[in-house]
Each structure stands twice: as structure tokens, then as C-alpha cells.
Image: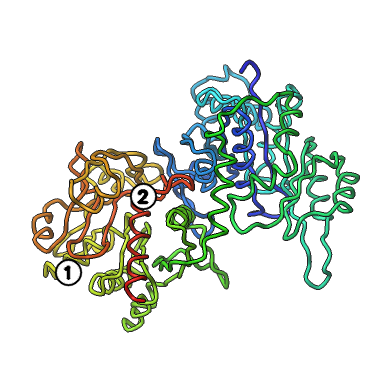
Amino acid sequence: MKHPKYIFVVGGVMSSVGKGVTTSSVALILQSRGYRVTAMKADPYINVDAGTMNPTEHGEVFVTEDGDETDQDIGNYERFIGENILTANYMTTGRVYLDVINRERNLQYKGKCVEAVPHIPENIIGRIRTAQQKSTADIVVIEIGGTVGEYQNILFLEAARMMKMKQPHDVAILLVGYLPIPSNVGEMKTKPTQHAVRLLNEVGVQPDFLIARAEKKLDEVRREKLASYCNVAADHIIPAPDVSTIYAVPAILEEEHMSNKLLKQLHLLPRKVVPQKNRLRQFERLCTTITTAKQSVTIGIVGKYFHTGEYMLTDSYLSVIEALKHAAWYHKRQITLQWLDPEVYEKDKRTVKELTQCDGILIPGGFGFRGVEGKIAAIQYVRTHHIPYFGLCYGMQLACVEVARHIAGLRGAHTVEIDEHPKHPIIIVNPHQKKNIEEKHYGGTMRLGAYECKLMKGTKTYQAYKQLVINERHRHRYEFNNEYIEQLEKAGLIVSGINPQQQLVEIIELQNHPWFVGTQFHPEFLSRPLHPHPLFIGFINAAIQKQRSEK
């Protein structure tokens, strides 16, 4: 396209209002009108990437195909538009400043006084244009993290202002605002969103559209009020009430003909789309499946990134949750999640019996010592009680430790992440990672991104994938110690997947068990609502079979 188009999505009132889902949905509906669309995220953190952020505070770290540690919204973009989002589509304040400083040190500014404005916004604009060029997108949808009025994202908003000023017909601004309904008042309030628009105006930006997020659908009275006070056309104020699944949001936006309005704003005409490739229609059919599925399957997740103060958050495992949902819907089931704290099992091992209430148990990735022995106790229980088990990354490593201890008889077996000098180091530091750890080079230095894996025929894993060679995404420093392969295989462990380039163990299974599978990689990153991951499909199927056998 001669003149690529850009849509900025900003948030008002509070975080977690739905900017990521709005960005994803806007990208999908424009994609369904025949345009090549990509999405990108501007994170206001000083961190260079999301890899060093606390997962409880920030949420999941999503890993791209090319090995970038990004915000969880990148995962939503991939799941909605069905395409890989690469490192060019993610930036943080830290990444931008680091680049500008390095350029200054290398005299790339040719002796100019380097300033926050204009040089930081110019760098941001350059990154947006690079993402457009690399993806060859007609339209780029850019989500700016945080909320308007925050100091952290002012320079991203300035970049949007500069682009809008120079290319008024090529740039659109969407503000996602929240309209609360206080329980003691019982009336939807527009004032917080009015204030958000005013704060946006203070940095020289006027929204072209308002996305009115609320518990209920925005009524006409309040739509007109927002139009009057926010200087936004009434038909550009789009109601976005709460829905049972985020995959219904694109259709909600299209009820208001949003794609037509966006195309008109950007001086574009719709293009022809092959009906079979219309993702909006495919999502609508998926939502029918979701709403009509009556039976449920219960999966227990044994993890540690749940609690913050008096509240329980699950964003740390967002991709895992979505992958479980995708697979459950594939089997025409709803999913019920049980959040299980491994530290409880450490205090009283008898409490591990609660695992029998679940149809399947999953242990996701993670780091550190907290709850490790409780996780191992949970793995031992599901192994001996033939409850389907799925271990991801750390969940695979601890499964290997459990098998080594309790089947192979290797007392003192452990991972060197927890015990530096165990009697039997089942899990060791990746040889390529030793220097990084010694020199304390942690950020962006793990085994990251997609790696090849060759499967063993006849295994559950091979039956799930139905192919010999796969590529999956990684995020870890530790690996299975190949010196113990023979001993653990004699104990019934099957190494069903190997990285052929480095002979690294990628997948393990256990003989004579309905489903006991562990992966060194993170299969959840490749699950899509329209194309669930084969291993999650297999896991959910095993859980359903267990459920049926108990009736």
C-alpha cells in the first residue's frame, strides 16, 4: 500500500480495561475486510523486555517465534489474527531509550543535542514504520500500554500526535474508556471517561473513536452525553459491554459497523474476501460452540503466581488458560479451572488428595524454589493414581525428578536450580547458559524462541502431532541431564522428543499411564482458538476419558 494506515489504541480510567482485546478485535475485523493487518504493543516500562518483570504484577511473559520476551497482549494478537507477531512489533520505554542512547554514543545524531522530544518519539515512529515494513501490513494497530494521564506513556502519545499531525487521513485514535455502574447508585457514569478524554486532549491528541467498556451496553442517552462532552461523533462511540468470552468482542464491535467506520476514517474501501478465510465468521461459529457446550471438564493448575494481597490473579498463566479453553471447545466442552497451591501440600501432604477432584492436572512453567516439593508431591500422586498429567517446562523437569526419586530409586535426585550440588542432578544448567549465570547476564539470555524437535513414532506425542518434526517455542535455562536417560528409561520414562541439533530432551512420557506428558517447551504459545494445540487436545481428551470412566 502506498500510504499505510495506523490506528492507535489508548486506555482511560484504569488498566485492564480491555485495550489488548480491543486492539486484537480491531485487527481481526479489518483483516476480515480484506486488508493485511498487524498489531504491536508499546509498553511504558523501563525494562528492555518483559522477561525481567514480575509475572504476578505484570502478567505472563509471551515468547515470540523469533525469541523476544514480550507482553501477554502479543499473545492475544496472535490468537486473534492467526499470524506470528515478531520482535519488531514490541517496544518498551527501556528499549527505546537504550537505542537512542546507543545511537548518541555512536555519533549517529551527528553532534546534535539529543532530547526527549523530538528524538524519543521519532525513534518510536521509526519502530512503528519498521514493523509495518517487515510485516508488509496495510494497517498497523498500535496499543499504548497504561492509561492516559500517566507520565510513563506521554512520549508514546506524543509519537501518535506527531503522526496524526503529519498524516491526518492515515492515522486514527481509539480511546478505550470504562464507564462504571456503582452498586449503591445503579447508574452508568460517563464522567471518568470524560476526564480520560480531557487528559488525552492535554497532550494534543483528540480521539476519533470511543470504545465504551462497561458491565452493560451503553444506552443512547449516555452516548449522546459522551459525544457532546468529548467532541466525538455519536456514531463513533462504540458500546463494548462485558461478554462471556473475549472471542465474541469482534462481533460486538461489528454490530456497530465499526470496520466500515474505521475504513471511512482512514479513506479506505473494503476489499473482497474469500468467505472461507473470513476470520470474523469463523470466530462467530466458534462462539456458537462455546455458548452451546453444556458439559464441563475440570483441570487443576498447580502453580505459584496466583496471589497479590487479598486478590487472586491468573494473568501469569494467560496462554495456558487460553490453550486449555481452545482444546476443551474442540471437544465441545466447557472448562472448569481449579487453582491449586503447592505450598499447601508441603505443609500437609494429606491435602494432596484433593487432586482426585480434577479430571486432569497441569503444572505450568515457572522459576525458583517456592512450592517445588509440593509440586513433586502432586506429580507423584497423579502418577500413582493415573490422573492425566501435563507438565510444561518446569512441570516437565519436576516430573523427571519425581520419576528419578520414586521409580528409579535415585535418592537425592533434584534440579540444580534448587540444589546446586544434588547427588543426582537430573536437571542441569544448559551448557550455553553457564557463562550468562556466572556473569549475571539474565535479561534476554535464556533459550528463547522456536527450536526444532524430532518425535519418536508410536508415542502419545507422535499420535497427537501426526508428524515427525515440529517447531515449538522455549523459555528456560535448564535442561534434562542426558547422563540419566538410560536409567530413567529403564524406570518407564520415554523420551519422545529430541532437539536434533543439540541432542536436548524436549518431550517425555510415561509408560502405562493414560496421559503423563511433559514438554521442555511452551506449547501454549502456539495454541489458537481456531487451531488448538495438539498436545492440549490430547490432554483434554485423556481428562474426558477419566471423567467417563468414573461415571
* First of labels 2, 1 by sequence position: 1
Cα–Cα gap, marks 2 and 1: 25 Å
Is residue 317 visible in the rendered image? The answer is: no
> For this view, does 332 lie left or right of residue 518?
right
The foreground one among 100 and 470 is 470
The foreground one among 318 and 324 is 324
Q: Quadrant of residue 466?
A: top left
Residue beneath label 2, please?
A: 522
Q: Which secondary structure, mark 2?
A: loop
How far from the left and from the top, in percent, is residue 390?
32, 60
Question: Looking at the image, is 346 positioned above or below residue 488?
Answer: below
Q: Amino acid under label 2?
A: His
The foreground one among 494 and 476 is 494
> For this view, does 339 lie left or right of residue 546?
right
Residue 405 image label: 1
Give the residue displayed 8% in from the left and 55% down from the top.
Answer: 486
